[in-house]
Every structure is written in structure tokens, then in C-alpha cells.
Amino acid sequence: MKDSTNRPLRLGTRRSALAMAQSGQVAEAVRELTGRPVELVEITTYGDTSREHLAQIGGTGVFVSALRDALLAGDIDFAVHSLKDLPTAQPESLTLAAIPVREDPRDALIARDRLTFEELTADPDRVARIGTGSPRRMAQLNAWARALGRHIETVPIRGNIDTRIGFVEKGELDAVVLAAAGLTRIGRIDEAAQLLSPDVVLPAPGQGALAIECAAANAELAATLAELDDPETRAAVTAERSLLAALEAGCSAPVGALADLSPSSRLRSSRGRPKADEQAVTELHLRGVVGTTDGSTLVQLSTTGHVPASPDETSVPQQLGRELAVEMLAKGAAGLMGERAL
Ligand SMILES: NCc1[nH]cc(CCC(=O)O)c1CC(=O)O
């Protein structure tokens, strides 16, 4: 790094176990990268103190605004966010310097007696009560139960990961659904009874990915942090967030999305042996879902595109997301998103 000072870099973080875990991991990576000490600065956000349900306080950005204020005020040098908590519109004053390699994007079920969803819902005389504050999870869990011909009750809850698992430990709920990535980061993934297949429950756009952000004015730091970026993760989450943005939905809306990238043998000019100027492409498969929280209606579509294997390629993923949104809107997605009730 060109900045020869050894002043510690200040990393702003929320104080939850999850935020501390992910900030701690990024702090270590930045220390290794720069040789500079990294100091954690605790910031309290409205999302941490409010007792309201996420859907009621609007969801979008409640966890990030205090960190962003601190970045713009120069109180901290960079911040680590869960990408899925970031609003899709990026302020010009801030740079998403790096999106590191993504953790498992799936949702996980934590259930009494370590039962799976199928086992939990098997007894027709006992309606399983499953806790989640996420309309996206409610919609898909209810749709899954309907498809199995079973009944569940989704119970709106919120709180940090420990609090949510506590509902099951105390016997107040039969199960809760959480992001596998969060459980992994705080070292509790072993308690998951089941990882929910994206064929049944699509995660939130960007779930499992982190975003490392700094002030746009701090171009030198942004360039340094960019070394922690994973282009494949960035391409995938760009497609997912582009879909979300084009659906004009906040993060509390019942929108699920997941992009998978797979190396493709298809070459840009496909005949004969690859020539030096031919570029390999990556196949990007994007799935999206919108539904009513009762699971009675889901609009679920997917699309596939080819992303050139250049490091900063985000225009194709962006376009794919927009195209899928248009198709979903044509199938009635807009009407479903109007529904915000829990
Ligand atoms: N909305 C809260 C939130 N933000 C990020 C994660 C988990 C980690 C991630 O997705 O990166 C969670 C908890 C959860 O949904 O269970």
C-alpha cells in the first residue's frame, strides 16, 4: 500500500455477534494485506435498538445507515456489511470496494429434535410453528407446506441469531429459519437440522456475501481493499440485486434470488481450437421468486446468460437481473409485492 503511515485503519462494526465475527475476519484479511493494524470501532444502528418488526420499520438499510454516516463523517475508514442488508441504490459518496468470496447462500432450519421440515410437518394433528420475520421466508415456507399438503404456522419474530435460536431452545417455537452464512460465521452451523435447497427456498439477494465499503473520496484505500474482491461473487450478487432493484422492492419484501456461476466450455467464437484472443465465458443462472406471504401464489422464474471472464464484468449480470424482473412483472409479480403484511 502506498500510504506509508502506520496509523491503524478504523473498521466500523455493529456489536452483534454476527457483525463482530464478520468484521473480525475482514480485519484480519486487511491486516495481512496492508501490514497495518486494524482497529474495530463499535457503532450502534437503529436496526439494533428497535423492537419493531423489520417489515414495519421498512427493512431497507436500517442496519447500515449509522455505519455509513460514520464513514462520511470520517469517524471510520471502512465498514463491513452483510450485502443482503444493503439498499440496492449505491450512494455516489461511498464505494463498494470489495465483495469477498461468498459463504453458503442457503437458508437453514433449526428445529426441535433436529427435525427436518418434512418431519416437522408430518403430523397432521400438530401444526408446526415456524419463526421468521422475513416475508420472503414466510412466502416460500408456506408454499412448501402447501405443496406437501401440510399445515404450518409462520410466526413473525426478530432479534439477533442467538435470540432466534432461543425460541426453539425454550420450546416456544418448533423451528426457526436463519441464513446458513450467519450461523457459520458465529460458529453455530452444526445446530442446523437442514439446509434448505434453493429449489424450495430461494435466499435473499446477496445472502451470504459481505460488502466492504469506504468513502469514495478515499480512492487509495478503495484500491487496496479491492484486492479482497471476488469477481464471481460480485457477478452473482450483481445479478441478484439488479433483479431486486428492477422489481422496485425493499429487502423486507418477499423477493428471493440466487445466481449460480459455472465455468462454461463455450467460447466466444466457438469453432475449432481456442485462439489466443478468445475468451472463456462463465454461465450465469439466475433464479428469482416473489410471492404472497401465505404462499398461495409464487411467481418463480429463471434465466441463463453468458458472462465474459473479465474481472470487472458486471453489465451482463445487471442486464440479466433486469430482464428477469421484466418477465416476473409480466407474470404478475408487482401485485404480489404490494402485500407487505406479516
Ligand atoms: N437480516 C439480518 C441478517 N443479515 C445477514 C444475515 C446473515 C448472514 C448473511 O446473509 O450474510 C442475517 C441473519 C439472517 O438472515 O439469518
Image (cartoon, rainbow, N blue to C red):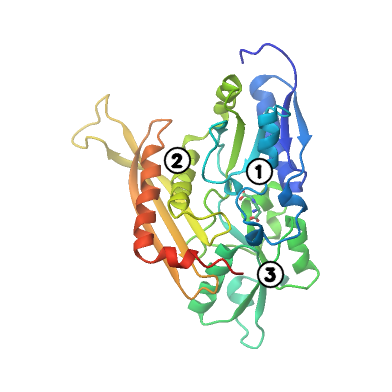
What residue appears at the point 39 percent right and 66 percent down from the top-left corner? 332
Q: Nearer the viewer, mark 3 or mark 1?
A: 1
Q: Label 2, on which residue?
A: 235
Amino acid on which the number 3 mark rests in the picture? Ala
The N terminus sits in image quarter:
top right
Residue 201: image location, x then y, percent: 52, 63
The kind of secondary structure element at disc 3 is strand
Q: Local crowd at mark 2 within 10 Å, few (<14), some, or many (≥20)?
A: many
In-front residue for pair 184/98: 98
Q: Which mark is residue 64?
A: 1
**What number of labels is visible?**
3
- Image side of residue 249 versus residue 252, left or right: left
Outermost right residue: 170
Q: Label 3, on which residue?
A: 175
- Asked if the beta carbon under badge 2 is closer than 8 A to the nearest atom of ligand 1, the reply is no
Asked if disc 3 and disc 1 are in contact, CB closer than 8 Å, the reply is no
Which numbered disc, 1 or 2, marks the residue that appears first in the sequence?
1
Residue 23: image location, x then y, percent: 70, 37
Residue 122: image location, x then y, percent: 60, 81
Does residue 45 appear anywhere in the picture? yes
- Image side of residue 191 versus residue 238, left or right: right
Q: Quadrant of residue 210?
A: top right
Amino acid on which the number 2 mark rests in the picture? Ala
Asked if disc 3 and disc 2 are in contact, CB closer than 8 Å, the reply is no
Up-down relation of residue 102 to residue 223 (above or below): below
- Image side of residue 219 versus residue 131, left or right: left
What residue appears at the point 55 percent right and 27 percent down from the top-left corner? 226
